[in-house]
Amino acid sequence: MRDKTKLVTVGRDKAATGASVNPRIARASTILFDSVADMQRAFAGKDQGVEFYGRRGTQTTFALTQAMRQLENAAGSYIYPCGTAAITAALQSFLAAGDHLLVVDSVYEPTREFCDGTLARFGVETTYYDPLVGADIIELIKPNTKVIFLESPGSLTMEVQDVPALAHVARQRGITTIIDNTYASPLNFKPLDVGVDIVVHSATKYLNGHSDVMLGVASATESHWPQLQARSYELGLCTSVDDIYTTLRGLRTLDVRLREQASNAKTIADWLSSHEAVDHLRHPAFATCPGHEYFVRDMAGASGLFAFVLKQNQTAAVNAMVDGMRYFKLGFSWGGYESLILAASSFKRRRTATAWDESKCLVRLSIGLEDPQDLIDDLRDGLDRYAEALQ
């Protein structure tokens, strides 16, 4: 079954749907049993699909975990209240006091905050590494290194990592690999197929796609699934079935949304590439993006997220550009149907292993489903305001 067909069919077993097309919304805390024997069987049935207690999930939950399991080619999937919760649960599942963790320097800022805050307090040492280090990461591995965390591309500066090389080094040394694959989605990259152990998504973004749900998911290989599942359950992490149902509905249109947003983004990036105010593009499909060669080799396509770098980092000029936007809205997150803009003028708190030229400003765009010409017109006007403010 190909991915397009999977998106339409997975998670629609009769146990979840009954006579309906879509899975039913099954809200529950207590699950009732007909006998002690039935309760004991449910307690023993820790595999997904067995209702035991609401925190473990209902048939609505299992519909989404089944869908993600099949899309990721995974042994199991767990649903979390947000993407950050999926990341932190995955890290906690495979780290203990005294362990060493390697994290890509372009990592999502809340992940860095968790490593430098909670994990540090719990006695876990974190070293940040160059996103383009590849197999040379072997030089950073210590005897107590237990996890390598990847994010490819980085969700702000967009460096694409050599994921197979990193996974190969880790496998040789018995180190667990975890990747944030939110940018690509399971349609454009399947990290478990190239040797990664756990893949994490902020389902808030492309999987749901409508900017109205907070949700995370982590999927694991057969060797790592039991530990991920057990630790996540111990942490008490569970999610509203209403949010799960909404994400299931969004998942059905992931392919058409992602292709349209990627096409729109390519059109806009092409226009930006020749603008006199732009230093360079950070779009994985363009040669100016660090790690572009790995994108070409490993990924089936791009999404709607990319960045461009302005030649001058002048706060008032950047603010003049952003504040006057009509179609691009200013806000965090990405991957919804609407276009967003975010300017990052400083990386001093975000970089420790690699440097960023602070004289240049990075502007990140999440391209939605609007007409790309309207978005180009919006950017043209914004860059005109930027140029005027520089004078």
Image: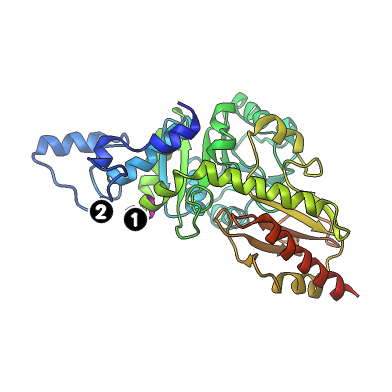
**Span highlighted in magenta in the image:** 240-244
For the point 78% across and 69% down, which residue is it?
318
- Report the amino acid beneath label 1: Asp
Vertical placement of 286 versus 2: above or below?
Answer: below
Q: Which residue is mark 1?
A: 242
- Report the amino acid beneath label 2: Arg
Q: Position of residue 169 (x, y in %)?
A: 66, 28
Quarter of the figure with the C terminus: bottom right
State the image quarter where residue 21 is shown: top left
Is 242 part of what is drawn in magenta?
yes
Crowdedness near tag 1: few (<14), some (14–19) or many (≥20) residues, C-alpha within 10 Å: some
State the image quarter where residue 296 is shown: top right
What secondary structure characterizes most of the magenta part? helix
Vertical placement of 201 versus 38: above or below?
Answer: below
Vertical placement of 348 versus 94: above or below?
Answer: below
> Which of marks 1 and 2 precedes in the sequence?
2
Res. 98 visible in picture: yes
Vertical placement of 338 versus 74: above or below?
Answer: below
Label 2 to label 1, Cα distance in Å? 8 Å
Q: Position of residue 182 (x, y in %)?
A: 57, 46
What SS does tag 2 mark?
A: loop
Is 370 part of what is drawn in magenta?
no
For the point 48% across and 45% down, which residue is it?
253
Judged from this view, the residue extending furthest toward the left is 35
Q: Do callouts 2 and 1 mark residues in contact (Cβ within 8 Å)?
A: yes
Q: Which residue is mark 2?
A: 27
Compared across the picture, whether 69 is left or right of 350 comes to left
For the point 33% across and 37% down, which residue is it?
12
